[in-house]
Image: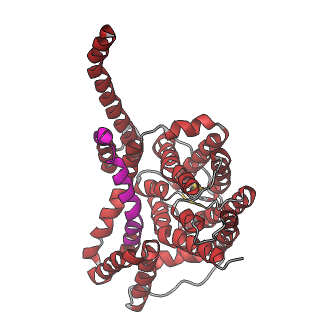
């Protein structure tokens, strides 16, 4: 076996975990989760990803890599007024929807029919607050933050995948060495804590439904595209259904939704992993091994994040979401005919609007689809006289 297989798997796991763990912490804080509940959620989702990745890679003989829904966690972190119990309820509803999508092919086709411009506008509206908040941390501690921002943009010129991780490690070391942190917490093994779910209409419509939509549109469909681009022919239903099933198992312990990975998968699916595509599935077991280690020490990792300066956590979360924001904006504005609908979706989502207990992501999607419907209706009306004239002439 080539050494590139385990190396690719471990790099993908470290980048995926370390680069976005700050977003997980931010999401947990937004719903008022305790440190114990946050550690339980990290442990649960790592276990879910480990098992589903091992199973799917072995069964399909493809490098099927899974991840947590970073856009979904950003949605949760940007929300307000929800409790951790409502968040768990939303995770359960989202998991059920993913299982249903895996079982019923028309659901996958329905999600695929949502215009990418509108879906990306909603995602961009969710993410833009994190990007602006990252730069708002500068006045609080410029001597720590400014060098880290500079390092991020320099490192990403050579290795974009490791740039966020470098900022996290470098910023953490700088914080400890300069006395901004008192000391490291004692190492401890992770435990799982049951969290009673609470199902409310506001959480189902304002959290679960947008979480399902962004997970499908910006994660699962992208993950399938990565596999197809690498020459594989995945069957979407079983892959999405399995991630939904393990999301359902991890949700009562605070584990957010899992899905097919895109960036991490790209690291494990290329020819650099192995020249023979039939051998690349072996990255799956090594990826699983990495996440089992993360699950075992999840409590310690969460404890370390708890003592780091808040400005550093906000900065890392914002920088980690820069690339997804850039991609979302480029897709949202790509189609000239859909730009107004995409911008309306973006603006409403970014506004933080809450109406009837339902969050901005849902209303942004509704507003964008209404604008798109009106514009398409106008186009059809404007062509009717031409169509009637052409029919009479023929």
Establish if 220 lies above or below 154: above
Which picture quadrant has residue 167?
Answer: bottom left
The residue most toward the front is 394
Residue 40 drawn in magenta: no
* Residue 84 rendering spot, x and y as whole percentages: 53, 55
Question: Is 305 situated left or right of 276 in this image?
Answer: left
What is the count of numbered marks? 0
Q: Is residue 178 above or below residue 259?
A: below
Quarter location, residue 266: bottom right
- Say which of 1 and 354 sits in front: 1
* Residue 305 place in picture, x, y as percent: 48, 75
316 in the magenta segment: yes
Residue at 41% over, 91% down: 177
Q: Is residue 155 toward the left or the right of residue 38 in the image?
A: left
- Res 37 seen here: no
Q: Identify the image's colour scheme: rainbow, by chain, secondary structure or one colour.
A: secondary structure
Query: Residue most toward the top?
Result: 392
Residue 378, by quadrant, is top left
Please report the bounds of the magenta region as a residue range.
315-340
Q: Quadrant of the C terminus?
A: top left
Q: Where is residue 192 in the image (x, y as percent from the top left)?
A: 66, 65
Residue located at (59% from left, 73% from top)? 8
Which residue is pictured at 37% across the width and 90% down the height? 178
Name the side, left or right, on which 316 lies relative to 350.
right
Q: Main secondary structure of the magenta part?
A: helix
Residue 284 at x, y percent in the picture: 67, 66
Res 335 seen here: yes
Against 308, residue 288 (above or below) is above
Which of the image's four quarters has the N terminus? bottom right
The residue shown at (35%, 48%) is 332
Decide which of 56, 244 is in the foreground and name it: 56
């Amino acid at each position: 076996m080539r050494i590139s297989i385990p190396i690719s798997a471990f790099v993908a796991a470290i980048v995926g975990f370390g680069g976005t763990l700050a977003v997980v912490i931010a999401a947990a804080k937004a719903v008022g989760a305790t440190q114990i509940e946050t550690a339980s959620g990290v442990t649960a989702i790592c276990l879910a990803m480990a098992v589903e990745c091992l199973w799917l890679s072995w069964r399909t003989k493809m490098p099927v890599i899974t991840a947590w829904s970073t856009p979904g966690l950003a949605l949760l972190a940007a929300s307000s007024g929800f409790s951790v119990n409502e968040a768990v309820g939303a995770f359960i509803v989202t998991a059920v929807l993913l299982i249903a999508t895996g079982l019923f092919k028309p659901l996958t086709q329905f999600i695929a029919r949502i215009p990418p411009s509108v879906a990306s506008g909603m995602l961009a509206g969710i993410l833009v607050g994190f990007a602006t908040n990252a730069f708002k941390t500068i006045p609080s501690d410029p001597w720590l933050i400014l060098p880290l921002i500079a390092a991020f943009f320099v490192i990403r010129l050579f290795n974009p995948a490791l740039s966020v991780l470098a900022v996290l490690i470098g910023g953490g070391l700088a914080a400890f060495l300069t006395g901004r942190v008192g000391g490291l917490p004692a190492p401890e093994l992770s435990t799982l804590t049951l969290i009673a779910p609470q199902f409310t209409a506001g959480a189902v419509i304002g959290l679960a439904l947008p979480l399902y939509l962004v997970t499908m549109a910006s994660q699962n469909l992208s993950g399938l595209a990565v596999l197809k681009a690498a020459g594989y022919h995945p069957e979407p239903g079983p892959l999405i259904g399995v991630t939904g099933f393990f999301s359902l198992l991890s949700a009562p312990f605070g584990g957010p939704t899992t899905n097919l990975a895109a960036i991490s998968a790209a690291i494990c699916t290329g020819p650099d992993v192995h020249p023979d595509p039939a051998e690349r599935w072996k990255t799956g077991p090594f990826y699983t091994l990495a996440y089992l280690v993360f699950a075992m020490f999840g409590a310690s990792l969460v404890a370390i994040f708890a003592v780091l300066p808040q400005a550093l956590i906000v900065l890392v979360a914002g920088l980690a979401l820069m690339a997804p924001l850039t991609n979302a904006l480029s897709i949202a504005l790509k189609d000239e005919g859909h730009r107004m609908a995409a911008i309306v979706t973006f603006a409403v989502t970014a506004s933080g609007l809450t109406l009837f207990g339902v969050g901005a992501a849902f209303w942004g999607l509704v507003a964008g689809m209404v604008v798109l419907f009106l514009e398409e209706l106008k186009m059809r009306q404007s062509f009717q006289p031409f169509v009637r004239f052409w029919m009479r002439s023929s």
